[in-house]
Amino acid sequence: SEGGPYETPFIHADEVETSWSLALFPEVMRMEDVADTTPRGFLPEGHIDMAGNLLHRPVAWYGQVGCGPIEVAAYKPGVVGKASAARAEKAIPGVEKLLDYMVKLVTDVVTAFPPGRLPPIEEVTQRPREEIEAVLKGPLAPGGRSIYTLAYPM
């Protein structure tokens, strides 16, 4: 299976997400209330990718409109898949890998950019240096600005 310990593909509020929820915050999960639905599309399998683009199909799941039903119309319980198959133990290896990666990411960011050091402004934006420096000061500092004052495109 392409889903590791999971019986069904990852979509939304399904076996995968419910397993992760059971592993991370079991006290808020009420398995007696879960519902199962059967995901469907309007085209044959193979064109549209699944959530997260896990199968590397030609059309990203977020890059289509009208090739499948909208969730609020087709999946009234809010589940797209088989939440009843969820088990916390299915998610534990993934949670551990995610946490290991987060430690690596934070370590790499702090190593590359220790406190007080940032990448060169002129290499990450085309905005005027003064504008970015004001935002870096923060909204409460004299001459500072909130990041929310920057409008896109950057």
Image: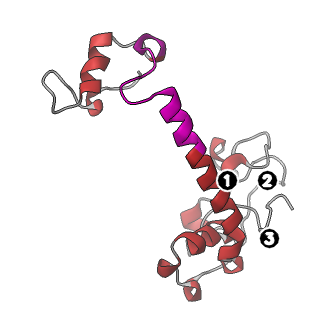
Q: Amino acid at mark 2?
A: Leu
Mark-to-mark CA distance, 1 and 2? 16 Å
Q: Amino acid at mark 1?
A: Ala
Q: Is residue 8 visible to the viewer in this orientation of the structure?
A: yes
Location of residue 78 with respect to 112 vertically, above or below: below
Location of residue 56 with respect to 133 vertically, above or below: below
Mark-to-mark CA distance, 3 and 1? 15 Å
Residue 108 on the magenta segment: yes
> SS of the residue at dot 3?
loop
Residue under label 3, please give it. Answer: 7
The x, y position of residue 23, in whole percent, is 59, 72
Viewer-side residue, 73 vs 135? 135
The disc, 1 or 2, on the residue closer to the chain's N-terminal end is 2
Viewer-side residue, 154 vs 94? 94
To which quarter of the image does residue 44 belong? bottom right
Camera-nearest label, 1 or 2: 1
The disc, 3 or 1, on the residue closer to the chain's N-terminal end is 3
Mark-to-mark CA distance, 2 and 3? 23 Å
Residue 38 on the magenta segment: no
The secondary structure that dominates the magenta segment is helix
Tally of numbered discs: 3
Mark seen at residue 35: none
Residue under label 2, please give it. Answer: 43
> SS of the residue at dot 1?
helix
- Quarter of the rendering occupied by the C terminus: top left
The x, y position of residue 1, in whole percent, is 87, 62
Name the residue furthest left. Answer: 142
Residue under label 1, please give it. Answer: 51
The boundaries of the magenta stretch are 104-123
